[in-house]
Structure formats: structure tokens, C-alpha cells
Image: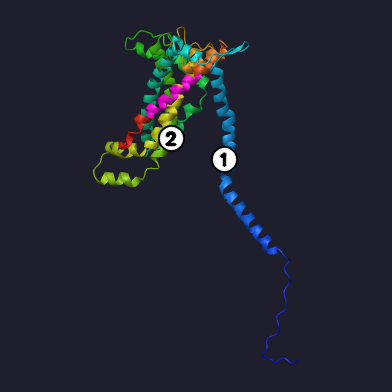
Amino acid sequence: MTLHADTPAPARPGPRRPAGDGGRGRSTGRLRAGLSRFDLRATPYLLVSPYFLLFTVFGVFPLGYTLWVSLHDWELAGDKTFIGIGNYVSLVTDEAFWNAVLNTLGMFLISTVPQLVLSLLLANALNKRLRGRLLFRVGVLLPLITSVVAVAVVFTQLYGRDYGMINWFLGLFGVDAINWQNEKWSSWIAISTMIDWRWTGYNSIILLAAMQTIPKDLYEAASIDGASARRQFWRITIPMLRPTIVFTVFVSTIGGLTLFTEPVMFEGNPTMSGGTTGQYQTVAMFVVKQAFRDFDFGYAAAAAWLLFALILLGTLVNHSLTRRIGGTT
């Protein structure tokens, strides 16, 4: 047969596809889609799971175990008898426990309120144009990196009864020497100044970092409108710092209600009694004394849970106060 020039050549048959290959391709596509969805949805949980595993092991489990211990008459080498809420009932009527609560709240108020006010004023000063302000900003963090033991030794010497610099200075105004460790109010003041000296710079750096995120246009517009620096501070800086102030208040509340290191070092001995009459014994010291001095772990665990409840209550009270900053009700 003769083919004309314009007649198309017959198409060559392509390779024959094996039977069922189309189904295999669809299965592969579904598998890839499923893996893609799994990667999109499950990978974030896998990445954050180490934190939650560690929190469960070192956070949730100790909390649950401490709660279980608090329901027992649990001694170190004795029997472990289930007594229900007996430890909590005993704590409610324990004068030593309530004395520790009073001391903790007293030192918390004396130290935390001035600390936050000073931190805010210091951060505002460091936010100005100053010569060598980097040096000043680094300097406010020096107390934080100083050894707590060294701080306690220095402050104990400052508040010494016979040769302390504080009593020497007060003596210039005719004030008799004060035995700072013997009275409740004097020991509270001494320990509170130690806390303020150590943590004021830390809070001021946090507030300073937040201040530097406030747009400068707000201050320029306020200056054009004739607002003074003080009015700008109260009308612009404080409302814009509200989230950071709430954070510092919460952190200071937790730290103040779990106060332990400063009063222990101020006492100068490991008895955890907080003075001869417990005049500056905190709840944390009370817990350690019951557990590792009297070996009553059930009673100490119950006190720790009541301290946890006290922290929650203090945080809620501070939240109700700080949420009003900036006109929020």
C-alpha cells in the first residue's frame, strides 16, 4: 500500500501500564496527603512534648505526691498512717504556723511595695539620655549576681547591735542602739532591705526593656500638646507598661511569699527557727523545719500546700489591683 506524503504516520503504541497501577498511584497520593496532615498537626505537639514530659515528672508528680503525703502521719523512719485532713486541722490551730504566715506577709509588704516603686522610678531614670547609661544599666544588675551568702554577711554586719553602721548612723541623731534580730519589726526591716537591694535592679531592667518598646511618637505628640514630663509618665508610660507591671508584681508576689534564703542567712544558724521567738520565721522556713528538723513530713507537706494556697490568694489579690492600671476595671 502506498502512503501519500500528507497522510500521518500511525502512532506507535506506548509501553503498556501494568494492571492496577492507577490504584497504586492513588494510594501513594493518599499516603502522602496523610503524612502531610500528620506533619502539619502533630509535629508542633512533638516539639513541645519534652517540656510537658519534664513538667509532669518534676512538677505534676511532686505536687500529687506531696498532697498524698500531707494526708498521712508520715515520719522519716516511722509508720505512715492515713489521717485525712488531720494535718490541715492541726495547722489551722497552730500558733507557730500563723506566726510564720504573719512574718511572711509582713516582710512581703515591706519589701515588695517599695521594691516595685523604686524599680519603676529607676527604670524611668535609666531610660533618659544619660552619660554612661550603659554602665549604670549594668551596675543595677550587680546585686543580682552577687552571692547571697556575701550579701547576708555584709548586711548582718551593717545591722550589728554594737558596731553596725546602721546603729552608728542612727546614733548621730540620738537613737539608742537597736538589736535588729531580737524584735519582729526591726528584723522585718533588716531582711526587707536585703531583699530590696538584691532584686530592685532586676525588676528595673525588665521595666526598662518594656519602656524602650513604647513608640516615641506618643511622647512627641504629648510634648506638642503641652504635656509635662510627669504627665507623660502617668498618662503614657504607666498605661503602656501595664502587662510588664503585672508580670513583675506576680513574680515578686511568688518570690516574697516563698521567702527563705535571706532570713536563713540573717539568722546565721541552720535551725530554721527564725530567731529565739520565731520573730522572722517564714512559712518556707517553717516547712523545712518540720520536714528536716522534726522529721514530720506529713505536717510539712500540709504546710507547703497551705503556702501554695496563700500564693494563689496573693496573686489573685494583686491581679485585681494591677488590672486597674491604665483605666481597666
Residue 265 makes an appearance in the image: no
Task: Using a 10 Å C-alpha cutoff, classify the residue at mark 2 as few (fewer than 14 neighbours), some (14 to 19) or many (20 or more).
Answer: some
Residue 94 makes an appearance in the image: yes
* Magenta-drawn stretch contains 316: yes
Q: Relative to the observer, which residue lies in front, 17 or 322? A: 17
Residue 15 picture quarter: bottom right
Residue identifier under label 2: 206
Quadrant location of the C terminus?
A: top left
Name, please, the residue furthest toward the right. Answer: 1
Range of magenta residues: 304-318
Q: Secondary structure at mark 1?
A: helix
Indicate which disc, 2 or 1, sits on the residue closer to the N terminus: 1
Q: Relative to the observer, which residue lies in front, 131 or 230? A: 230
Q: Secondary structure at mark 2?
A: helix
Q: CA distance from mark 2 to mark 1?
A: 26 Å
Q: Residue at the location (66% across, 58% down)?
A: 27
| Left or right relative to 179: residue 224 | left
Location of residue 5 in the rendering, given as x and y in whole percent from the top left corner: 69, 91
Q: Residue at the location (40% across, 24% down)?
A: 112
Location of residue 100 in the rendering, given as x and y in whole percent from the top left corner: 44, 14
Name, please, the residue furthest toward the left. Answer: 226
Tell me which amino acid carries mark 2: Ile
Residue identifier under label 1: 48
Task: Using a 10 Å C-alpha cutoff, classify the residue at mark 1 as few (fewer than 14 neighbours), some (14 to 19) or many (20 or more).
Answer: few
Tell me which amino acid carries mark 1: Val
